[in-house]
Image (spheres, helix red, strand yellow):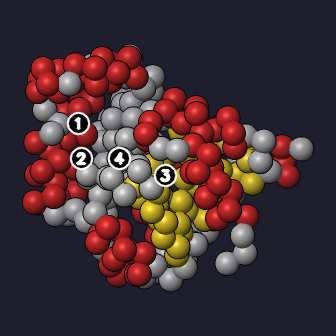
Amino acid sequence: MQTNKLPLLFLHGALGAASQFQHLTGPLSEHYDIHLITFSGHGEVPASEQGFSIQTFAGEVLSYLETHQIDYIHIFGYSMGGYVAMYLARHYPEKIGKVITLATKYNWNEATAGKEVKQLNPDIIQEKVPVFAKALKERHSAHDWKEVVTKTAGLIEELGHKNILNQSDYTQIVSPCLLMMGDRDGMVSFQETIEVYKSLPLAQFTVLPDTAHPLEKVNVPLLTYFIKRFTTQTI
């Protein structure tokens, strides 16, 4: 029965939408009560007056849980979605079970943010990577994809000025966490991931072989194996 399944929420990354998880939720739906959220201003979801921020997106998760009368849930967060999951685990521990992150960047400062913001120029994306631009246009069909990119750049720039999760925050997260990254991830470093892993009281760390940053590049059977293994094991 549905009520006997573990509740599992999927949170997408920057420039993403819940539709990106279709290849993952299928294999997992037999074992989990799957929940999907598309953050405001992404996909088909109207933009919020609050704009793009980690706090805004975390608030949308809390509203979703309240609307669906969910008291407690496990989270899989990809990239920015993993950062939102960590923020929720830090500030709303009573609602968050286990947290699994993949390809999440934790070390935000002006230098790292500036590097990412340079790549978030809509005109350059359209000129240099038209296939990606087309994918963004289709994914965010209810919005101007260029505006989504610009707002995302603003969110990252804000994180560069003020990283809202630091080492002391991670030491206070009581949720068991599994941090995953690909060995070919050009955005996320081993060092920043391991530093967070070591700060967390209950954590595991996994490297996925031959895996780059994009979610579409991940080995689905391998990822689903680790999700099932972590969420069902006693820690």
Q: Camera-side residue: 174 or 66?
A: 174
**Residue pictured at 47% horizontal, 44% vertical:** 218
Distance of label 4 from label 1 (alpha carbons)? 21 Å
Q: Residues within 10 Å of mark 3 (few under 14, many from 20)?
A: many
Q: Taking 218 as reference, is 108 left or right? A: left
Q: Earlier in the sequence, mark 3 or mark 4?
A: 3
Q: Is residue 31 visible?
A: yes
**Residue pictured at 34% horizontal, 77% vertical:** 195
Read off the residue under disc 3: 77
Q: Secondary structure at mark 4?
A: loop
Q: Secondary structure at mark 3?
A: strand
Query: Given this view, does label 3 or label 4 mark the residue nearer the observer?
Result: 4
Q: Earlier in the sequence, mark 3 or mark 2?
A: 3
Spot occupied by residue 219 in the image (x, y as percentages of width and height): 52, 44
Q: Taking 116 as reference, is 64 left or right? A: right
Q: Secondary structure at mark 1?
A: helix
Residue 151 is marked as 1
Query: Given this view, does label 4 or label 2 mark the residue nearer the observer?
Result: 4
Spot occupied by residue 181 in the image (x, y as percentages of width and height): 41, 58
Read off the residue under disc 4: 213
| Residue 97, placed above or below residue 203 | above
Query: Given this view, does label 4 or label 1 mark the residue nearer the observer?
Result: 4
Give, as a three-letter code, the residue at label 3: Gly
